[in-house]
Image (tube, helix red, strand yellow):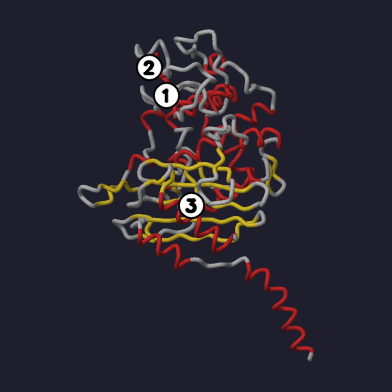
């Protein structure tokens, strides 16, 4: 009787643990095969805890090295939220304001040529309402600097700043430069010291500061040749540019707009911090009020806040907050539900999938599988 009782108590104790260990591997593998995904890494958060991680496919097709959960992906535009989070730390410290003129923050005049009296604020920059565009490129601030580019006026759209929206990578390379100028710390080192280290995460923007053996090769699929083409520029170390680095101007070398390298599990931990409005497991990264400002859309049409946006188009019936990424063949997603305390991270290193209604088909399918089989 005593043995039976002990066994029953043990099973009762273990039941919640088993409930947190779903394994939708077969469903994920089906999507990998359907879209010819080269490498896949996912992480799922439920009730504020990471309950599922999985890596499938290859870290590198040529060497046939299997993908592991600790491997690092360049995550593209999800990186923007790290830049915005860092700047909000400076807002908290009273060093800057979201209403500051970015001309004074960046160190050179930034004004729309048709609306020279309209101040472009930091808030407009982080919400893609600055009226800037990427037509002159965004890998150097020379594009927008009147002293460097005779065609600088082409960097602006026809509408007045604050009166329209256009997603623009230059916004965030400029934002990263402002972070560097105001903080006095090199951009990549600031993010590591003030966000990654406090949360216990491994990653960063500087290639040579990371273990290169962990990088996942990214692939663009060429439909004409029916081949996956590796994209080594995703992890270009930029050593020559760094050798002549000008603090407060050369910052786009690190790509504040898209250059973060991190694992799915560690990004899920970072996501939990935003899901809990700036704090996770006793580590306060930004104040609650500023974290909420990141997540609240400034426009109902675009549903974009400050480097985070809301969507109801990914999972039917769920309004999620987060961001996607797409560059060098990679597709990524980080979305969470701040009230229900769950979230999903998905990285794809290359695939043959297309897009529907603005979302990558494989990302959408994978997010819905993880939601249905683990969260719902």
Locate the C terminus and report the quarter of the image it occupies.
bottom right
| Residue extending furthest toward the left | 225
Q: Identify whether 127 is placed above or below 67.
A: above
Q: Identify whether 59 is placed above or below 232.
A: below
Residue 225 as seen in the image, left or right of residue 91: left
Q: Marks 3 and 1, Cα distance to the nearest angstrom?
A: 28 Å
For marks 2 and 3, the one nearer the N-term is: 2
Report x, y in % for residue 67.
41, 58
Q: How many residues crowd around disc 1 within 10 Å: few (fewer than 14), some, or many (20 or more)?
A: many
Q: Marks 1 and 2, Cα distance to the nearest angstrom?
A: 8 Å
Q: Nearer the viewer, residue 148 or 98?
A: 98
Report x, y in % for residue 108.
49, 13
Identify residue for label 2: 154
Q: Residue at x 36, y 56 (%)?
A: 37
Identify residue for label 3: 346
Is residue 82 visible to us here? no
Q: Nearer the viewer, residue 203 or 279?
A: 279
Q: Residue at x 20, y 49 (%)?
A: 225
| Residue extending furthest toward the bottom | 1
Residue 85 as seen in the image, left or right of residue 351: right
Q: Residue at x 47, y 33 (%)?
A: 257
Identify residue for label 1: 133
Q: How many residues crowd around disc 2 within 10 Å: few (fewer than 14), some, or many (20 or more)?
A: some
Report x, y in % for residue 310.
56, 40
Are the residues tagged 1 and 2 within 8 Å (C-beta)? yes
């Amino acid at each position: 009787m005593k043995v039976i009782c002990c066994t029953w108590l043990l099973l009762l104790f273990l039941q919640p643990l088993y409930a947190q260990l779903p394994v939708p591997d077969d469903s994920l593998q089906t999507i990998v095969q359907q879209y010819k995904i080269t490498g896949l890494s996912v992480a799922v958060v439920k009730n504020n805890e990471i309950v599922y991680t999985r890596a499938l496919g290859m870290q590198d097709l040529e060497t046939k090295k299997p993908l592991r959960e600790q491997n690092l992906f360049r995550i593209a535009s999800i990186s923007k939220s790290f830049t915005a989070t860092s700047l909000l730390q400076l807002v908290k410290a009273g060093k800057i304001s979201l209403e500051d003129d970015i001309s004074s923050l960046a160190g050179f005049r930034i004004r729309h040529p048709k609306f020279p009296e309209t101040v472009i604020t930091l808030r407009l920059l982080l919400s893609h309402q600055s009226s800037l565009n990427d037509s002159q490129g965004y890998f150097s601030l020379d594009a927008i600097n009147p002293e460097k580019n005779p065609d600088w006026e082409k960097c602006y759209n026809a509408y007045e700043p604050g009166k329209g929206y256009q997603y623009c990578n230059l916004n965030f390379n400029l934002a990263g430069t402002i972070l560097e100028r105001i903080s006095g710390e090199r951009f990549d080192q600031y993010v590591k010291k003030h966000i990654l280290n406090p949360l216990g995460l491994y990653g960063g923007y500087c290639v040579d500061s990371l273990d290169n053996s962990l990088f996942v090769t990214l692939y663009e699929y060429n439909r004409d040749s029916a081949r996956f083409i590796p994209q080594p520029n995703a992890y270009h170390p930029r050593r020559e540019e760094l050798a002549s680095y000008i603090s407060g101007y050369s910052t786009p070398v690190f790509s504040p707009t898209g250059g973060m390298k991190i694992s799915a599990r560690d990004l899920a931990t970072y996501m939990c911090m935003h899901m809990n409005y700036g704090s996770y497991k006793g580590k306060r990264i930004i104040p609650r009020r500023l974290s909420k400002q990141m997540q609240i859309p400034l426009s109902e049409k675009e549903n974009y806040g400050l480097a985070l946006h809301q969507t109801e188009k990914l999972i039917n019936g769920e309004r999620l907050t987060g961001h996607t990424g797409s560059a060098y063949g990679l597709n990524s997603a980080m979305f969470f539900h701040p009230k229900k305390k769950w979230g999903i991270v998905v990285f794809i290193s290359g695939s043959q999938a297309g897009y529907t209604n603005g979302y990558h088909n494989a990302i959408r399918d994978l997010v819905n599988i993880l939601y249905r089989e683990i969260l719902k």
